[in-house]
Each structure stands twice: as C-alpha cells, then as structure tokens.
Amino acid sequence: MRTLKVSIYALICTAFIFGASVKTKAQPFNVNGVEYELTRAIPDISLCLDLIEKAAEHPKTKNASKMHYFRGLTYLKVATEYPDIAVEHPDAMDVALNSFNKAIETDSKNKWTEKSKGHLLNVAIGFYNIGFSAYEARDYANAIDAFDKAVPLMKYDVDGDLRRANLTEEVLVQMIAHSALGMDNNDLAMKNFSKLVDMGYDDPNVYTGLAQLQLISGDTTTALETIAAGRELYELDKTLINLELDLYLKLGRSQELVNKLDAAIEQDPANTIYYFARAISYEALDKVNKDEAVDYLDLAAADYDKIMELDPEYYDAFYNKGVMYINKVTELVDEINKLGIYDPKEVSKYEAKINANYAKAIGNFEYVFENNDMMGEAERMELAKTMKKIYARLSRMDDFNRMKQWIADNE
C-alpha cells in the first residue's frame, strides 16, 4: 500500500507539473498552432486569427519575430483569400504589412526575414489592387494611400517577379500622380511626375503631364525646359510636339521655333524628324497667321514631301499630309457657315476648293492604306471609312464600292 500511495502521489505531482508546463507554454503553442493550421489544405482561418491575436498579446510572444511572421501570413490570407472574413477585418492588409516589417525588424537570428520579404511582395500586389479599385471608383484619396504603401516594398523585388508582371515603383508613382490629378491636387501630381522624370520612366506622357502642370502653376520657363527634355527623348511624339508648338505660339515665339528647326535641318538635312516637326509647325502657323502672305500649308506639304523622298516608309508623313487637307476642308465648311453664303456661284467656288483638298488627301491615305502593314486593325478600319466618304464626295464610285466591300468583309 505504501508503494502504491507513493506511485499515486508521484503521478499526481507529475500531472501537476505537466499542467503547469502547458499553462506556461500556452502562448508559444498558439504560434505553433497557427503554423500547423496554415499548412493544412483548408485551414481554419478563424482559429488562426484567434490563436495569433492571443500570442500577440502575451508577453512571451508579442515581440517574437516568428509570431510577427505568422500574424502577417494570417492577415495576408484573410485579405486575399477570405473575402467574407476580410469584411470583418478591413485593415487586414495593413496588419500584414506591419507584421512582416516587425518580423524583419526583430529577427536577430535571421530565420524569418527572407520569408517576410517574399510575402511583402504579395502585400505590394494587394495594395496595388486595393489602390486600382479605389482609383476606378474615383476614391482618389484611398487610391493614393494604397499605392503609397506599396512603393517602398518594390525594393524586395530583387528577382524581378513583379517587374515581369508590369508592377514597378514607376507604375505606382504614375498611379499616384494620376490619382492626385483626379482630386485636383496639382502640387502632389507635379511632385510625382517630377519623380518619374528623375527615375527615367519611359513614357512621353510624363513630360506632357508635368509641363502642363507647370504651365498651370505659371512656371512657363520650367515648362519649356521639361518639354525640351521630353522632345530629346521622344522626338516623334505628337503630343509633345504640339504642346511645344502651342506654347511657342501663345508666347508669340512661333517663328523662333521654326528658326530652330531651320538650323537643325541645315546641320542634318537627312533627318526626317526635323522636317516632320517643322511641317507640324507650319500647320500651326497657318491657323494663327491667316493674313500672312506666306502659304504655310504649302510649306508644310513641301516638308512632308521631303520626308517621303527620304523615307517612303515614313507613313506618318503621308497620313499627316492627308489629315492636313481634311482639316482644310473643315475650315472651308466652317467659313461657309460663318459667312452665311447661299449664292450658288459662291458656294460652287467653295465646293471646288473642298473637292481639291479631298483629292489631295485621298492619294496620301491610299498610300498608307495599301503599304503600311504595321497599321493596327482599328486604325485601318477608321481610315477605310474616311476614304469611303471621300470617294463618295469625289464621285469615284468604283473605289467607293471597293472600299465599302472591304469594310463589310473586315468589320
């Protein structure tokens, strides 16, 4: 009996000690429980949330890098895989971000840092998606907040996984700039467009957007410098060319721009880009110098012809020349309407001019349509419809019927 009593006493003591041990280790076991649960095919995410929050409050685990890592992983899963539960945790992505950062900060043994950095890329994707949804909903303030949180995470994309998916710091900064424009925060937009320029972001619209904002702020000199910098990189970009032309015209410096191009052509007479820019400049001058003795459209046409001579595959020159004559038709029609001309003889004179411009336009359009294999389907269809209307106007019915059939076959 004595032996038995000792055995029972020993067993009771052992059970007591074991129970105490379990109580002491309960919080580390919570973290381990989350670790185990997340390995299951269908984890109980509510259980993970409960366990990890208990661990986050306990003094033995609240500063542990492992706890921060699994807290980040739990909330990342909530934000990206459990939409019903995410409704109850609208800040889940923020918790994931802060937890992974804490895991890196407290990881003295470097056990969780690399894993945390990897998951921070998923957090970046999450914030991008949140920001883009907010942007589409015109909730620009929240869009900026989300994009801004994703920006510093791009440094972890060392293998270029996100870059290959077209998610980069530059893309995020551009979205911040456009969101700022959406909420009329020109200063923030200008700051981010300037940042993109400094980053060397490959998009001429960045220079256009920045220059326009600088003009709004009244800084014409800096706007001209921005346009000039953009034109050096994107010599053929029509938006930048037209913005430069428009600004020079508004400043009364249109001839200065033409003089610059004259000098450039003299130095490099085979450079088609200079002729292209000067042709557009002449077109712009034609709109503001109607009383001038100089026929700027003839000068523009001569530059387009020079381009065609130098490079028969420079299809933009052919197309622009055609559009130039269509624009002239529009001016003539507007002039008839403005003057209220009803005399058949006078109307007939205008119609002759209109038809002459249509005839000049169609030859250029035909060349582009028949030779430019790189033209997109939508652009080719639009051009075909324009040509069909011109053929009808010029009573070229065979060509009209041919183009009509092509459109029917390709729509």
Image (tube, rainbow, N blue to C red):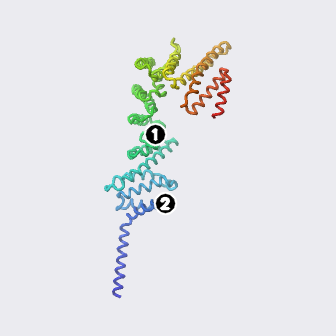
Q: Residue 122: percent from the left, percent from the top?
A: 44, 49
Q: Is residue 304 left or right of residue 410?
A: left
For label 2, the residue is: 41
Q: Is residue 43 above or below residue 336?
A: below
For disc 1, the neighbor class at 10 Å (few under 14, some 14 to 19, many from 20) is many
For label 1, the residue is: 175
- Check the image and name the residue furthest to the top: 293
* Quadrant into which the C terminus falls: top right
Q: Amino acid at mark 1?
A: Met
- Check the image and name the residue furthest to the left: 108
Q: Amino acid at mark 2?
A: Ala
Mark 1–mark 2 distance (CA, rounded to whole Å): 36 Å
Q: Is residue 101 left or right of residue 406?
A: left
SS of the residue at dot 1? Answer: helix
Q: Is residue 307 above or below residue 7?
A: above
* Quadrant into which the N terminus falls: bottom left
| Mark number, residue 62 | none
- Check the image and name the residue furthest to the bottom: 1
Q: Is residue 104 above or below residue 321?
A: below
